[in-house]
Amino acid sequence: MLRRLLTQTSSPRRLLSSKTPFFSKPSLSPFSSLPSSPDPPSSASSHVEESGSSAAAGTTISVDRSALFNPPDHSHEPTPDSELVKHLKSVIKFRGGPISVAEYMEEVLTNPRSGYYMNRDVFGAQGDFITSPEVSQMFGEMIGVWTVCLWEQMGKPERVNLIELGPGRGTLMVDLLRGTSKFRNFTESLHIHLVECSPALQKLQHQNLKCTDESSSEKKAISSLAGTPVHWHSTLEEVPSGVPTIIIAHEFYDALPVHQFQKSPRGWCEKMVDVGEDSQFRFVLSPQPTPAALYLVKRSTWATPEEKEKLEHVEISPKSMDLTQEIAKRIGSDGGGALIIDYGKDGIISDSLQAIREHKFVNILDDPGSADLSAYVDFPSIKHSAEEASENVSVHGPMTQSQFLGSLGINFRVDSLLQNCDDEQAESLRSGYWRLVGDGEAPFWEGPDEQTPIGMGERYLAMAIVNRNQGTPAPFQ
Ligand code: SAH
């Protein structure tokens, strides 16, 4: 089946240039930095045609600074406060105390007026970071293979809601639709629902999916790529249920807010964001239990004794747990499955929150709204949340991205694309392939050391949540 899908996947439309920056988010430990990539973006432009519920602390809290962890470095010159900084400071002031790291993260990323994602395209060489769909067309194509396999296991329903959470530029969906275009019964069954909070990115997705508006509503259109209806929503809850469903979440969970806890002589305390006397943001520890502690207790019941013994810091994401429950309930009652791919761990996360601006790690508290914030995904917490929410689902994985793409046959795909391309395209295909499945620093790299490509194959993990009626999804058998 996989082999047939791979040979029928349509010919390449876009190949990666070797100048594409090789920086992706989790390549270094938090707070360290990498030089920026000087070259212009090329992945999106080098197209070729050829024959082939946050439990944020809402209560007023007085602050104990005695156990301050990791004080931020504010060595930069003071600059006038941005709209978002003013907003955050006013929230802290009127609340009468600091806000949780989760609330800070949520405001920084998705504040409707000035959140990081809300008003611009943040991807690629001229943005802040690059993701797998932007690295190579093969990524979206392989997700297409996964989706068609699941649709077959679902009994080839005539109508399917294909939901993507956080589609970015829409590149994954474009490659998925192009790659599966020969499977007319599949593409004709699709109703695409894009869950995207950013009006700017919704517009870009509309453009890249070559949509024409069906009615006066901008929230509903037809993609001319496969004649498929496309709808936009800002949350998963808004997507109509009652229809067999396939959900894709690539690099979505890492953007969901996390609460951070730290062990202190007083026990576990939540790390909070406050404004100091110098008017700069700083971290402080909450002196008393916060509402998110309930989620900490829940998470700790899923931790192994070894994990519990070693931990000094814990990061938890109630929003991720709640989202997973919503996904599992939907899949449990409507049928289908969800695929989650992200960087993270098959274990509890201690302290991973990081900020990235222009391909460099920067201080989390520095000029909020101008850098991406993201955290490692806690895969066991997703598994347990799904199992808790519905008896009708089974959870598979996580497995590494390398195993996932390898078992789906990405090596056959790259070989078939290499049959019909020029030298530059071949080089770009090989480096894109290595980037998706490789690990550590690229052995073939001859450019400057500081731009050495870092493989995503081992650090990115894939997990599936499927309705039990569907059996075990490929390639988790
Ligand atoms: N999946 C894409 C983009 C990843 S970046 C890729 O791999 O290239 C995260 C995406 O999720 C962006 O599109 C961002 O705007 C969206 N997003 C982040 N937080 C969100 C939220 N709370 N609700 C809806 N969309 C969100």
Image (cartoon, rainbow, N blue to C red):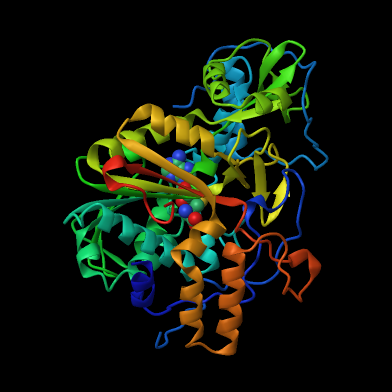
Residue 387 image position (x, y, % from top left): 40, 31
Q: In this view, does 406 lie above or below 83?
A: below
Q: How many marks?
A: 0
Residue at left offset 41%, top offset 84%: 52
Residue 146 screen position, x and y as percent: 38, 59
* Quadrant hosting residue 148: bottom left
Residue nearest the observer in this picture, 339 or 68: 339
Where is 444 relative to 271, above or below? below
Would you say 286 lies left or right of 137 here?
Answer: right
Residue 131 seen by the camera: no
Q: Which of 107 and 343 is in front in this view?
A: 343
Q: Is residue 468 above or below residue 258?
A: below
Quarter-of-image position of residue 172? bottom left
Q: Horizontal and vertical percent for residue 68? A: 77, 22
Residue at 57%, 73% in the rendered image: 42
Residue at 72% in and 50% down: 28
299 and 215: which is toward the camera = 299
Furthest residue to the right? 75
Quarter of the picture holding the N terminus? bottom left
Residue 374 in the image: x percent, y percent?
A: 59, 43
Residue at the left extreme, as displayed = 158
From where the camera sits, is residue 460 visible?
yes
Q: In this view, does 160 lie to the left or right of 373?
A: left
Q: Which residue is drawn at 35% across and 36% down?
A: 328
